[in-house]
Image (cartoon, coloured by chain):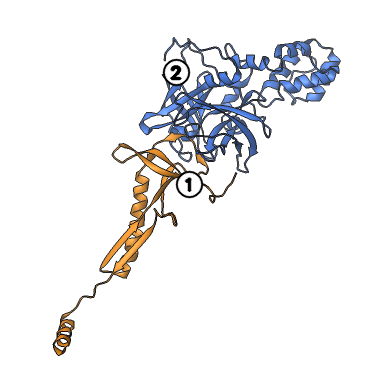
Chain colours: A orange, B blue
Amino acid sequence: MSFSDENRAERTEMVPIQLPNGAIAKIEIARNGGREDVAFGLKQFEDVGTTIEGIVEVLSMTIQKAAPSKATIKFGLEVEVEQGSLVAAIVRGKGKTHLEITLEWTREMNQKDEENLEEEESSQ
Amino acid sequence: MDQSFNQKQPASLEELLQQCTVKLTLPELHQHGTGFFVAPNLILTCNHVVSGSAKLKCPEGRRVKVRWQDQENFVEAEVIKSCVDPVDLALLSFKQVSSTQVPYVYFDTKIEHRQNLYSFGYPDKDFPNGFPVTLTYVGLTGDKPPYMIFNREQIRHGMSGAALLNQDTRKVCGIVKFTRDAGSDLGGGGVSAQTILSELPELIQYQNVPCQKDDLWTSFLINGNIDRNTLLERLRSCPAGIFRVVMSFLRPPAGTLSSENSAQATRAAELIEWAEHPDGCGLEEVQKAYLRAIGKSKL
């Protein structure tokens, strides 16, 4: 018996979820154990959507400060149940879940830069 | 309500507990859990079964579909009282039909380390018609009020609200609330009978044994180790000196029994009634005290 999350074998389970339009779907979630009230109810997938919105909002604010020409964000989420609700987690070291950000800057040339470039090319 | 239902005569107290158990469903929330009869027209369950969250108080008047035995639409009950976490209890009322008498449970607050608990509930999968579990009581948490902790069995979703029958005292000592891991046999926790009767004192009036029609529960107590009627008869007819010794061993609270001038038969009946009350000492203690007083090992 252990209170720790460590050493717990990774288990998954298919659970029914309710989408905002009322449709029922199933999702595979991680079962990491832990205390949980045991009424049976459909989990609301909106909770996961809210988490994704929050992650995107925080990352986009940070990226906007850096002002790149192009930004690519890739992230994978693991969904689990906590306190009866679906919770999305970015978990390190499992391969399937990650956060990867690529930023690119392209220097925009003004007229003077273009003239200098032409001069360099003609002198060669 | 289907009045033609023929209740099967239970062969054991565990089977009777199953007959006291119901499945509670809220179709609009796609949610279900377990509950049990605690009076002729009352069902006890956890608040989170009917509200969706232990922290969210269930609106009074919420309608809940009740399945009893194989009657999928036995009755529709109404939430009349609910307590949020950490108590997490809800009381539901339903209209009785005179031809259908439901059995209900008796509580006992006494519970000791390592005693076996039996429970019956409606898990989320594999056993849509109910599933029994046998658990071992570990102890109380440090919370206020404390939760009962039990292990050695898997507590799955849907089991919330199931009664916990103490197989030693042969009465209900709590209600299932949470799992420690729904995917393994780590067990879980529940709300104790002490908390239930303290938060819902209106239930105590139904605990004065025997008060049920065709009281099956009491018949199982009698058929257990202690013959209630025999014990009562011995206390009524024993010499006054022996009765006084029994009283000195048990020391019931002042005011529990009539004055010493009253008839011994009356006082003996009052003693038994107190012993069977959830706050009483239990019939076993009365029997022990009587045997000690007469210097014998059995009745």
Q: Residue at x 52, y 44 (%)?
A: A34
Q: Amino acid at mark 2?
A: Asp
Q: Chain of mark 2?
A: B
Residue A67 location in percent, x, y? Answer: 29, 69
* Quadrant where the C terminus of chain B is found in the figure: top right
Kindly state the secondary structure of the residue where label 2 is placed: loop
- The answer to which quarter of the image holds residue A29 is top left
Circle on res. A10: 1
Q: Which residue is mark 2?
A: B70
Above or below A110: residue A25 = above
For residue A72, side relative to residue B191 (left or right): left
* Quadrant where the N terminus of chain B is found in the figure: top left
Q: Residue at x 48, y 39 (%)?
A: B54
Determine the CA span between mark 1 and mark 2. Answer: 38 Å
Above or below A29: residue B155 = above
Nearer to me, B265 or B147: B147
